[in-house]
Structure formats: C-alpha cells, structure tokens
Image (spheres, helix red, strand yellow):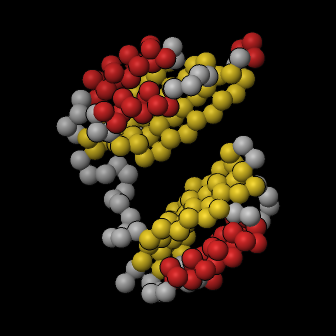
C-alpha cells in the first residue's frame, strides 16, 4: 500500500540542505513526488510530497527528521496524508485562473484579495508575492495567485469583486483564465 507524507523544513539558508533532505527521503525508502523550495529573508523553506510503499517509512522519516533538526538547526514538520494526495490542478468541477495584483506595498493586500476569493469558495492552489523597489524607491508589491474557480461561480462577478477590493487597496488587480 502506498503511503504519502508531507515534509516541510525551514532553517538558515546554506549549501547542502536540499541534498540532506533528499538523502533522508531516499534512505527511508521514500520518493519525492513533488516539491516547492525557496529562500525567504535569510531562511530556506521547503515542502516535499513524498511517497513510499514501505510500512515503516513514516517512522523512519520522523526519526531522521529529528536528527536533522538537532544537527542542522532546522525546524521540520512531517505529516502523514490519509487517503493520499488530492486530484490534480485544476480539481474536477473547477477552472484554473490567475489573479495578479500590483501596487505600492502596504499591509492588507494578501488578506484583502484572498478574502474575496475565500468568500466565494475559491481555492488558492499557489500564491507568490514579492516586494521590490519601485519608481522613486518606494516599495512595489506584486502578488500572483493560481486559483480554482468552481464551475458554479461566475468569473465576471469574481473579477468585479477583485477590482473593487483593488480600488479599496489602491492597487491594480486582474483575473484571467490560466492554461
């Protein structure tokens, strides 16, 4: 029987962290099926979707993760996925859309835009943000979201709600089909 795990880790960025985590997964007779990795601030963050047919792989991953935490100052969370991973993106009965927002950086952009989507039962499958110097040196904020809009939800109404929230936040917001 195939078992599925999510392993997430954060810690001070340095060369070799990916190799150590991948080695741990391999040594526990598991496979990395999907992953996301990035540097945020001064820390490295990773999320790995792992699978194994070995009945004790989860226990071995947990022991190995504790050892990596002690040896390398990482914070690691291991979670068993009951029933395996969800359907591929987009999920059945949904369409994939991209939301883009940009403007002067200010508190509340993520909360406002994501709130509009949540209020309409729209699932966010990926989100990335970044702040960089804009014209004149003021911070310019950019956010990109991949979202599954249910077939029962009118994308035009979602677009109008996002634009209204963009007006409130004084940012530009767009919604377009993806793929």
Image: 174 above or below 118 = above
Q: Is residue 136 above or below residue 32?
A: above
Q: Which residue corresponds to the image point at 37% horizontal and 57% vertical from the top-left?
A: 88
Q: Is residue 85 left or right of residue 57?
A: left
Q: Residue at x 75, y 12 (%)?
A: 136
Which residue is pictured at 47% across the width and 74% down the height? 51
Most extreme residue toward the right is: 15
Residue 106 screen position, x and y as percent: 59, 22
**Residue toward you, 176 or 160:** 160
Residue 35 percent across, percent down from the top left? 56, 60
Report the quarter where the C terminus lies: top left
Residue 106 can be seen, yes or no: yes
Q: Is residue 56 above or below residue 42?
A: below
Residue at the image point whose x is 61% and y is 22% from the top? 105
Q: Is residue 24 left or right of residue 31?
A: right
Spot occupied by residue 132 in the image (x, y as percentages of width and height)? 70, 27
Check the image and report above or below for 66 versus 172: below
For the N terminus, the quadrant is bottom left
Residue 94, quarter of the rendered image: top left
């Amino acid at each position: 029987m195939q078992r599925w795990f999510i392993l997430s880790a954060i810690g001070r960025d340095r060369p070799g962290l990916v190799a150590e985590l991948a080695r741990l997964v391999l040594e526990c007779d598991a496979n990395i099926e999907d992953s996301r990795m990035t540097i945020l601030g001064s820390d490295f963050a990773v999320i790995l979707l792992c699978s194994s047919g070995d009945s004790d792989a989860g226990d071995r991953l947990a022991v190995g993760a504790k050892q990596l935490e002690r040896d390398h100052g990482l914070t690691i969370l291991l979670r068993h996925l009951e029933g395996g991973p969800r359907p591929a993106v987009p999920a059945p009965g949904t369409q994939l859309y991209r939301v883009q927002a940009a403007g002067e950086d200010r508190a509340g952009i993520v909360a406002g835009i994501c709130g509009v989507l949540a209020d309409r039962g729209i699932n966010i499958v990926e989100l990335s943000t970044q702040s960089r110097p804009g014209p004149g040196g003021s911070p310019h904020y950019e956010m990109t979201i991949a979202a599954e809009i249910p077939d029962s939800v009118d994308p035009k109404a979602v677009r109008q709600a996002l634009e209204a929230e963009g007006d409130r936040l004084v940012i530009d917001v767009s919604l377009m089909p993806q793929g």
